[in-house]
Image: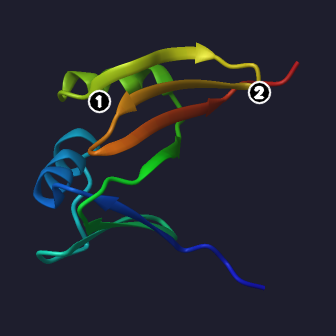
Amino acid sequence: MVILNHVHARVRDLPAAISWFERILEVRAAYRDDRLAVFSWGALSLLCDASDVDSIMTLGFESRDCDADFAAAVARGAIALDPPADRPWGARAGYIRGPGMLTIEFEQARPTA
């Protein structure tokens, strides 16, 4: 069996992406150089690669309080894309614009009836 432990996202402006993750999500790069930055959340890491194109992807973060996490990110300067709302798939989720073409999702499980 194999286990997913990292994903790569290409970004055109690596220094701006590093700054965004540090400022908005308050996470520091575990490693960085002029071509790569590694951000880790537990067992999963995001590797931002300097590139001439931006990857289009959504990074979903599990949240205990979607509304508070969304509001805190916006207060730190994130651009709101879609405010927290109850979604048809059984979660509460809100979306902000990440660096490059990344979208950040804060998702909170809703109690089942």
The image position of residue 22, as x and y in percent, is: 19, 50
Q: Nearer the viewer, residue 64 or 24?
A: 24
- Which is more toward the observer, 46 or 70? 46
State the SS at label 1.
helix
Depth-wise, is mark 2 or mark 1 nearer the camera? 2
Disc 1 residue type? Answer: Ala
- Is 52 in front, or is 91? 52
Give the residue displayed 42% in from the left and 38% down from the top.
Answer: 103
Say the numbered circle drawn on residue 89. 2
Q: Earlier in the sequence, mark 2 or mark 1?
A: 1
Whether residue 7 is visible to the viewer of this picture, yes or no, is yes
41 left or right of 85 in image = left
> Residue placed farthest to the right in the image?
113
Quarter assignment of residue 85: top right
Give the labeled residue for mark 1.
73
**In this image, 68 relative to 29: left or right?**
right
Quarter of the rendering containing residue 79: top left
Amino acid under disc 2: Trp
Position of 38 with respect to 57 (left or right) is left
Residue depicted at 18% across the width and 27% down the height: 77
Q: Is residue 69 visible?
A: no
Pick the front one: 56 or 18: 56
For disc 2, the neighbor class at 10 Å (few under 14, some 14 to 19, many from 20) is: few
**Quadrant of the rendered image containing residue 96:** top left
**Looking at the image, how many numbered discs can be counted on the residues?**
2
Q: State the image coordinates of residue 9 (x, y, percent, origin top left).
A: 39, 61
Q: CA distance from mark 2 to mark 1?
A: 24 Å
